[in-house]
Amino acid sequence: MSVPESEELCLDVSGGRSGQGPATWGQQAIWDAVSVLGDDAPRYNVSVGFELPAGRPRAAVLEALTRAARLHESLRTRLLPDGAGGLTQVLDAAGRFPVTVRGCEREDTERAGGQLLGELAALPFDCAGQWPLRIGLVEADGLVRYYAMALSHTAADGGGLRRLARDVVMLLDGVSPERLRELFPATQPLDQAAYQHSERGRKRDAASRKYWCAKLSEGPRGLFPPRGERVRDALFPNAVLHSPALLRAVDHVAAVRGVSGSSVLLAAAARQISLLGRAPEQLLQVVVNNRFLPGMSQTITTLAQEGLFHLRTVDEDFGDLVRRVHMSALGAYRYASYDKRLLDRDIEELRGRLPDLADHSCFFNDTREPELFRPPAGDTEVPPLERAAELTTLAWPVEFPPRKNLSFAMDVVDAPGALELAMTADSALIPRQDMESFLRGIEDAVVGDALATGCV
């Protein structure tokens, strides 16, 4: 099917303060990660698109976007290298966003919107010379029916993206920027950087880096023994478990055990690591959104960093394991906000004294925020939990280039009417059959505990 003609616009925005200052820890960390990717840099972009069932006039949508850009300074922030590897963030009072408008038939809205979203997300950003946001609108019958936006990851993480989408919808519905400020007070990136460079911020950074070095000194040296021949440049397979049963089971177990859903899944993952690696002591890098910090719950910027989760033994009883994992995770979250450049320096210095550091090559990332957003499940009938487990599917959608110091990375993702576990692993340590048993074992543990505690 041919691509409809597009109209390219520039949306001029003015208003709000201007200024400059050092980059935040999150901006610098993402910049460093993206700068080495070359042509693969767009892989780090964040994006979202959604239908507007009622349809909106183009002018109303562009006005909502203008107000959002005045409200959230990360959308008007450029990042300038200082020549020594560091960054300066520059907040502009005025500038412009590129907007692509595409027309289609009414029944083709979702397909055309998804295609446009993919195109926008696949383009790199020049974060020094342009604002880190591009917009796509799909029109049908004279109204905007689909709204898409792609951002540089230096401007927002997944949590920031969800909050921005919420604010755009509320602005479209007539809520004023002043009211949004009252409902969702948010620290701006320049103010966040000022805190991080203050005495209190530096103390937090130093405490986090000290915690990391202690765990890397005392943690387990290996989680998975070699299981297969290591082939140079071999791709890492990606498996996706799509489970309607897990969606209900995680919520139920979290409520019964008095913990978060993330802790339930982290406990189940810890059990599977113990079974596959035959080593009860574990160290995982857990992505922490850091929005529990004062003033950060509603901030639209990039805040998420890794916490180092340490578990010395795996309880036989799953309920006991869930509760202990939850308490250990809370401790790790306290030390998940830091200057990554300084942490990397500290780790290299530690490696010079202690070459055999603890294995920290496993990653867990629960990307969901069900209290903020969960995809609608539609009108599909919800079967009993035991029968819902029969609807689980496992797919192998893609393979990725090998990543240094990675045994596995698992993302927890919301899907309409289901929960998905997406796992990428080094086949020399975790072959495909073990990846499948790992993911199905997580489902079995959580669904089994939900059934045992009264979920039907």
Image (spheres, helix red, strand yellow):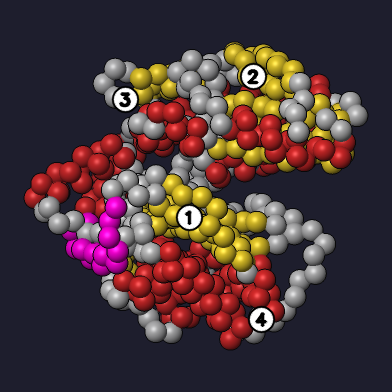
Location of residue 18 with respect to 247 vertically, above or below: above
**Residue that badge 3 annotates:** 86
* Amino acid marked by disc 4: Glu
Quick one: quadrant of the N terminus?
top right
390 drawn magenta: no
Quick one: label 3 or label 1, which is nearer the N terminus? 3
Q: Secondary structure at mark 1?
A: strand
Alpha-carbon distance for marks 4 and 2? Answer: 49 Å
Q: Measured from the top left, where is residue 419 in percent x and y? A: 61, 62
- Mark 2 and mark 4 in contact (Cβ < 8 Å)? no
Quick one: quadrant of the C terminus?
bottom right
Range shown magenta: 216-231
**Residue that badge 2 annotates:** 98
**Is 228 left or right of 51, judged from the image as shown?**
left
Q: Considering the whole magenta stretch, tell me its main secondary structure.
A: loop
**Residue that badge 1 annotates:** 238
- Mark 3 and mark 2 in contact (Cβ < 8 Å)? no
Nearer the observer, disc 2 or disc 3?
Answer: 2
Quick one: label 1 or label 4, which is nearer the N terminus? 1
Nearer the observer, disc 4 or disc 3?
Answer: 4
Determine if residue 316 is in view.
Answer: yes
* Amino acid marked by disc 1: Asn
Quick one: label 4 or label 3, which is nearer the N terminus? 3
* Amino acid marked by disc 2: Pro
Q: 4 or 342, which is in the foreground?
A: 4
Location of residue 28 with respect to 438 vertically, above or below: above
Alpha-carbon distance for marks 2 and 1? Answer: 34 Å
